[in-house]
Image (spheres, coloured by chain):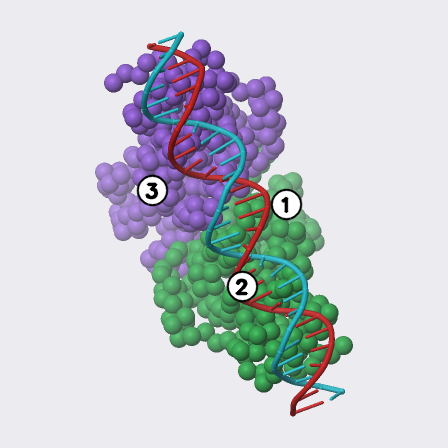
Chain colours: A green, B purple, C red, D cyan
Amino acid sequence: MKLSERKLKILKAIIDNYVSTAEPVGSRTVAKKYNLGISPATIRNEMADLEEMGYIKQPHTSAGRVPSDRGYRLYVDSLMEVEQLSKDEIDKINRAFKKKVEGIENVVLQTSKILSDMTDYASIVLGPQLTKSTLKRIQILYIEQGKALIVIITNTGLVENKLMDIPKTLTESDLMKITNLLNEELLGLSLDEINSSMIKKVRNRLFGYEDVLELTMRVIISSYREFDDSKIYFGGTPNLFKQPEFMDMEKVRNLLCLFEEKNLLMEIMMDALLDKDLAITIGSENKHEEVKSCSLITATYKLNGKIIGRIGVLGPTRMNYSKVISVLNFLTKRLSRKLKSHLEGE
Amino acid sequence: MKLSERKLKILKAIIDNYVSTAEPVGSRTVAKKYNLGISPATIRNEMADLEEMGYIKQPHTSAGRVPSDRGYRLYVDSLMEVEQLSKDEIDKINRAFKKKVEGIENVVLQTSKILSDMTDYASIVLGPQLTKSTLKRIQILYIEQGKALIVIITNTGLVENKLMDIPKTLTESDLMKITNLLNEELLGLSLDEINSSMIKKVRNRLFGYEDVLELTMRVIISSYREFDDSKIYFGGTPNLFKQPEFMDMEKVRNLLCLFEEKNLLMEIMMDALLDKDLAITIGSENKHEEVKSCSLITATYKLNGKIIGRIGVLGPTRMNYSKVISVLNFLTKRLSRKLKSHLEGE
DNA sequence: ATTAGCACTCACTAGTAGAGAGTGCTAAAA
DNA sequence: TTTTAGCACTCTCTACTAGTGAGTGCTAAT
């Protein structure tokens, strides 16, 4: 069933008002603040319809209306006009980006801080993913008998290392040989390409070292995933908890519990469609109980045109979608640019 | 002025009771629950004295008494008996420690989780400090023209790496030379020993590379500090906020703000006497406003007899000091043992 | 020195009343 | 047929009022 133009206008008015006041919106308010040219009584009738259709609801009989998740969804999909950032806001962001930080991961973290500052909600960040990068250099260092260190360096400027147990008989020069071979064969490949067929190919070239090689490859592959999984951060919780919906501690504690579990955060982040540049999940659309009263908006950031991570905002369902989206849009673009210059320059 | 035996007993009773109930303690309660053989009236007189001396105070005229920070201090210093952990608790800890984790830092993090689980307060952890370790191996890897990666490996099993800009003229073999020299000269030294006089000594052995060497040394030294400073973690906030003193969001938010600032956390952690095995800071003894209603107990953990980090508990001043101390004692010993086996075995 | 007794204080609870915001329905107006 | 004015009704919120109970400090007796 199609909503009339007027109903849409009323719904939009209700949401806009509710987002900024956090109070249920009555017919009188809509009539007064948004000149729709109709009386409160008419609006009341329309509101009754909207409620019947599930776009808004009443906290109690004699209160105004509050948008439902379904209402927000409609709003986000077709009603909302994405506002432009003001000059002040752009300046603020640019100023914040001026601050020098070292390391690509810290740049992303810095961005997340800006994000939650600008929006007044919490931010969640998926750091630059190893799995989205290609191998630039790999080195196996001999530490002591039976132990070696794998150092992985990617084209995105990420450096990770991992201790590995090796056969006690291996010497430093053995490792050197393996290192050289791996570099020759694997450079420029992404993880997806370093698969089992690759292993076989490398294997053929290294008689006598097959076992070590296989071990090394396994460590590399598992490390990739492991590092990526650990690269999830959140910040700005104090901002989020300033919102009136977090008056009762119960909710706050539930969310804090969630934030302590990186793998849960990860799942929530992953529920968003990963291929989409901008993903919006509203309230009950979230799979996890703890965030069913929150909305999550995530966007991708890139390096040299390739998506390498996501950055997002977690707020109450009554969040300022338009504002958040415009900040996210600007910020991810800005971040991508900074990452690029970060990698080239320095 | 010396407190009579009886006053001490009453103070102890008040604190014990307040710690477990979070309610102001009245004279009747003390008389009934703790058989001191005196009537409520007498206790009231003694309580009036204790209040005058600043060990306890009244929230309002007709309420029972609540310990003051000074009262807690006396309690902690001379009244409290440190309880033994129950068999169940020891089992629980041992079971938690059974879980395999990789990397020395993760072992410490795991311990912090156990700590806040056992105590129901928040835990703060200072990871294994580079500055408390000695150099086991250092390696400078050539990445590309003008860029190199320093990899530092310590005797404590820590591995850190840092990208460094180098003169564009340097080749891979130059770096090898420097690496070899550094390894020869610096191995087994702690940061305190890698100071400027050391730099001079190394310098004399490397004609033509003085500049790079100096740069490298500077990067190493500053990285040491930088890595150490970033190794502070906290967890268990949901536990902490379950405590009745965190009913109002204002306090919660203030603390959350604090937790977002690593350097502030660091300062708080550092205010504790670093040379002490067990440091207790009570309420207003804390320098930072945000934690003046909290107490912090920290303990050291060691590797091969050398202190390499601290682990602590942050709770309301009304925390169960005795319990926390016994858990901390046991846990740090257990942790030190695990770290040792982790380093040797694996 | 200790204690019983007592008046007093103060937070907390429940109950009540009134105000205000907003609704749905009805009947009149457009 | 649609819109609107009017009105009774509902429900939350606030302020006020006792009443209760825990706990105190003081006084006088033990």
Dot 2 falls on a residue whose secondary structure is: loop
Image position, residue C3 (x, y; %):
42, 13
Residue found at x 34% / y 43%: B289
**The image quarter in which residue A193 lies:** bottom right
Residue under numbered circle 1 = A218
What amino acid is at disc 2? Ala
Instruction: Identify the chain of the residue marked 3, using the numbered disc in the image.
Output: B
Numbered disc in front, either 3 or 1: 3
Discs 1 and 2 lie in a common subunit? yes
Q: Which numbered tag is attached to residue B288?
A: 3
Mark 3 neighbour density, 10 Å: few (under 14) some (14–19) many (20 or more): some
Across and down, in percent, residue A112 comes to 47, 59
- Which three-letter amino acid code belongs to the residue tagged 1? Arg
Numbered disc in front, either 1 or 2: 2
Image quadrant holding the N terminus of chain A, namely bottom right
Indicate left or right for A191 with B51 as reference: right
Q: Which residue is mark 2?
A: A22
Horizontal relation, residue B208 to residue B82: left or right: left
The image shows residue B312 at horizontal and vertical percentages of: 44, 33
Asked if one can make out residue A122 in the rendered structure from this viewpoint, the answer is no
Identify the image quadrant of the C terminus of chain A: bottom left
Q: CA distance from mark 1 to mark 2?
A: 52 Å
Q: How many numbered circles does the render carry?
A: 3
Q: Which residue sits at x=27%, y=51%?
A: B211
Residue in the foreground of this view, choosing between A154 and B283: B283
Question: In the picture shown, does residue A183 fall above or below D27?
Answer: below
